[in-house]
Image (cartoon, rainbow, N blue to C red):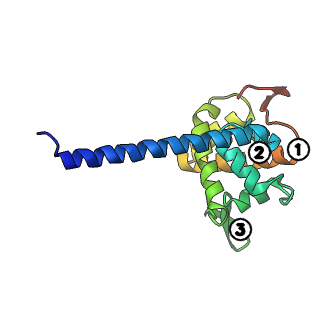
Amino acid sequence: MPLNPRIRRLIDDMRAQWSELDRRIAAFDAEFVAAARSDADARRLSTIPGIGAINATALVAAVGNAQSFARARDLAAWLGLVPRQATTGGRPKLLGITKRGNKYMRTLLIHAARAALPSLINTEGSLGNWLRALSTRAHRNTVIVALASKLARIAWAVLRSTATYSATIGGRPATV
């Protein structure tokens, strides 16, 4: 059964709007890539597995050079990527993540961890070993959030120093 001419015009109009949105998104993506290439901190952050142009520019915009965070855990806590604690009788119990920090950055880092996990879990070295061990005893989503917290801590170290990220195996650089 052929479509009504009115419906056909509406679909064509929706297709044109969709194409315009795709064009605008591509322009914004190109702008983020250009900004990440021109900023030294964003370039160094882009060497971290899972961190691309959008994450790098957002981290630089939100955190700067990370001088306001004394420790890497402070950055992870600011992002809401550390476990809540309930203490009874002097024994702390770790619960889910706090979710009190920067929701946008937390979401970006969790998506970065979700994208990087399949390749990182197969790498040799301390990060790959840690991920394999954690994945045997924890749910996949827990592993992803733990990796996101680890990525935030690595980002803190990269921003505080002038070095780029490099995984090492026995003191020599590894390919990640």
Question: In the depicted view, which residue is nearer to us: 150 or 94?
Answer: 150
| Residue 77 seen | yes
Q: Which mark is residue 154?
A: 2
Compared to 71, does 155 lie above or below?
above
Q: Amino acid at mark 3?
A: Arg
What quarter of the picture does the N terminus occupy? top left
Residue placed under numbered mark 3 in the picture: 91
Quarter-of-image position of residue 140: top right
Compared to 37, does 10 lie above or below?
below
Q: Amino acid at mark 2?
A: Ile
- Secondary-structure class at tag 1: loop
Quarter-of-image position of residue 8: top left
Question: In the depicted view, which residue is nearer to us: 20 or 29?
Answer: 20
Q: Earlier in the sequence, mark 1 or mark 3?
A: 3
* Label 2 – label 3 distance at C-alpha: 29 Å
Q: Amino acid at mark 1?
A: Ser
Q: Are marks 2 and 1 in contact (CB under 8 Å)?
A: no
